[in-house]
Amino acid sequence: MANKDERQRQKPEPHLMNAQREPEWQEATTAEAALAELRRTLTAGRLKKRLTMDQVKARSGLGRTVVSQAFSSAASPPSGATVSAIAEALGLDVSHLLKLLEAATESRGKPSRSAVNHVDAAPTGANELGRPIADWDPHDLEIHPAADAPTTSGSGSGRRWSATLPTYVSRAHDEELAVLISQVDMGHSRMAVLVGTSSTGKTRACWEAIQPLSTKGWRLWHPFDPSRAEAALADIERVGPHTVVWLNEAQHYFGASGGLGERVASAIHSLLADPKRGPILVLGTIWPEHADTYTALPENGRTDVHSHTRALLSGRLIALPDSFDAIATKHAQAFARTGDSQLAHALQHAHDGRVTQFLAGVPELLRRYESASPSVRALLDVAMDARRLGVGIQLPVTFLEQAVEDYLNADEYDRLADNWLEHALTDTARPVHGNIAPLRRNRRRSRDAATPSAQTHQTSHTYRLADYLEQYGRNERKLLCPPASFWQAAHDHLSPPDLIKLAEAARHRYRNRWTCLLLQRAAEAGHIPAVTELAWFLNEIDSDLSLRFYEHAIAAGDTDAMILLAQWRDMDDLDIEGAEELYWQAAAAGSDEALEVLSQRLDVFGIVEGIVRFYKKAVEAGETQYLDALAEWQQEVEELEKIDWSSPKARNYAWNVDNALILLGRWLTQTGVRDGADLRKSAVSAADASTPIAYGFAEFAIREATEAGHTELAGWLTELRDLNGNYEGAEQTILHVVDAGGASSLQNLLYDDAGERWPNFIDLWPNGLEPDGSPSGPWSAS
């Protein structure tokens, strides 16, 4: 043990201890003083102008909450765009105020002395998820690196790349996020998902929004590994108060296959609804087409696969514009004048206000694509087609290599060198501005390669297409049907979930032979959802074979197959009893859709009788644990038999959907399939959702295409309508519609309001089409 003299020597002198602390306190004091001076200047300017908060709001174009927080000493520092807008509205020196703001926020992310005390309220512990917000690098949260302005120093092209983010320019959606942050800061759990196309600033907006929480001890959790959805579901129960749940590219969470996405949505809903776990902030980003998929009501006769996600996203989507409006551009120009070279360069070269896209490297990305060699461009076209038709983000190189063949003309294909693929992939992997590569290899970690799932699903290297090229391909190639080599390569190399997506795309393009081949391939791999899809597709082509596939999927426990076959038996009163039995079978497996149907088609007496039949079969099969339940429900039948059903009150009770759902909920809880307590709420909300009738009217098809932004498709449909039943010249127009994936829309043109027949592509091509648009010959499923 050290003696007294040694301990005295080891102890720092008091003046040295103070000297060590002084920079930290001095930094906080300077920042606080700068922020106070900034707010005093704004307040003095407002009083001099004799303006109310609402008048400042009107002059600056900002929301009232944002304006009030800029003047409030209790709020976090305002953004640069807010200060710039208010200063211009009050006639103050913008440059001076921005310098004060810079001084006030230069240590942002480091808790100040006042913030340290607040941190104690945040949770602590070794098992916490995520880490403090201030410890995150924004690029690790998938914020695109931004291109820097060119410089004349150095060598090469004179361009350089920097990890520095340009000054943030606030827009209308930031006001909505600011309100959300205020509510979270008051102890409420909240969620928002930003909707916008690629490189529009969604992720950066989320990052900027949470900075006020950084100095208050909040943590950020980004579920990512081994897959986003798996990580989210595995650990969401451990999320504690004062945590930001970061769901960037939310389609990877809510769109996960095998029902995983719906389970993630349900878990997040439970997290937000539990006051003991709050406050929690869930932030996500998503592309518009994915948001549309999750919020759209299902087609008639199709399973509702996104009901939980649709409910979760309701009222929680915030739209981002594709470009800067006049106000945002004005604020960006102010930052550029005060020295932001990145913004200055982007403003000089961006078109139509697409500043964020330019910063992310879009112009160079598109230039590379448009000037690429035939082999490189063909490779990118294959990747674009795969992504726009629903294939996952990881594209096997074996698929890309085989699919390229028909994207090249005969001369281009003959001139390919033996090592053309190696050179093409090297070219597409070269990054452009912002470290974005047109087509980049996905590198698996060694621990992932050792897992059975990795070995099963990935036997070759995979590549990922740049986000913006994917978006570009969706628009520029949306009217094209991929050639035969694409479909054959998909058949040979893609996984069953991808094959199901492509089979749907083939069906919408009336490529019936390939629809069948792709589904068969997935079914042969043992993928039961593919068996169900194949059975549904073959309903009207080969009913006997379709029934065999249905029975195979039902034997495997697939509730979708049970419901689809039940709907088929319901059709034209083909087999009412058989249909009802299938609905009960699906309900016993926990299908909400089947429960909803039963509650609407049966009265209370019919529900109870059905439950009794279920228990009788179970007991006869040797499941004696249901003896007591059977006796209980048989007694229920006896009680119902005593009721006088001729009275209006009794009839109303019998057909009341709520009563039927309560009985079904009791039954589900009793069997242990699931907790039926919430059944009434979920099933009634689904039953109340009305789906418009999508068949029988030409105008509906045209309006549907127009609202979806498919102007060419709408034009072709209008042209067909105006042919007035004349087949002459119709075939080529119909082919355009089908190539663009509009076969479903053509169904709406089969009959007009008077019941007269329109040009029918089924009559033109009874066996469907080949990828090149030629009619298919006779084919059969096996």
Image: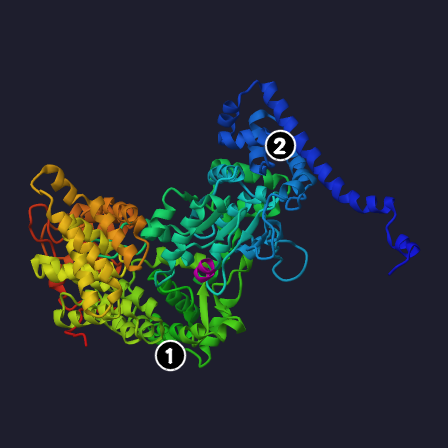
As shown in the figure, which amino acid type bears the numbered disc 2? Val
Q: Residues within 10 Å of mark 1 (few under 14, many from 20)?
A: few
Residue at 45% over, 55% down: 249
Residue at 19% over, 77% down: 782
The residue tagged with tag 2: helix, strand or loop? helix
Instruction: State which quadrant residue 589 falls in.
Output: bottom left
Magenta region: which residues? 228-234
Please tell me which residue lies in front, 192 or 696.
Answer: 192
Q: CA distance from mark 2 to mark 1?
A: 63 Å
The residue tagged with tag 1: helix, strand or loop? helix
Q: Is residue 1 above or below residue 770?
A: above
With 341 as the anchor, is 352 left or right in this view?
A: left
With 183 as the anchor, is 295 left or right in this view?
A: left
With 718 as the anchor, is 5 left or right in this view?
A: right
As shown in the figure, which amino acid type bears the numbered disc 1? Asp
Q: Which residue is mark 1?
A: 414
Please tell me which residue lies in front, 551 or 237.
Answer: 237
With 490 as the anchor, is 159 left or right in this view?
A: right
| Comparing labels 2 and 1, the label whose residue is closer to the camera | 2
Please tell me which residue lies in front, 445 or 756.
Answer: 445
Q: Is residue 718 above or below residue 407?
A: above
| Identity of the residue furthest to the bottom in this view | 418
Residue at 41% over, 59% down: 470
* Mark number, residue 94: 2
By secondary structure, the bulk of the magenta-drawn segment is best described as: helix
Percent x, y for residue 328? 50, 38
Q: Residues within 10 Å of mark 2 (few under 14, many from 20)?
A: some
Is residue 224 rendered magenta in the image?
Answer: no
Q: Is residue 471 above or below residue 275?
A: below
Q: Quadrant of the N terminus?
A: bottom right
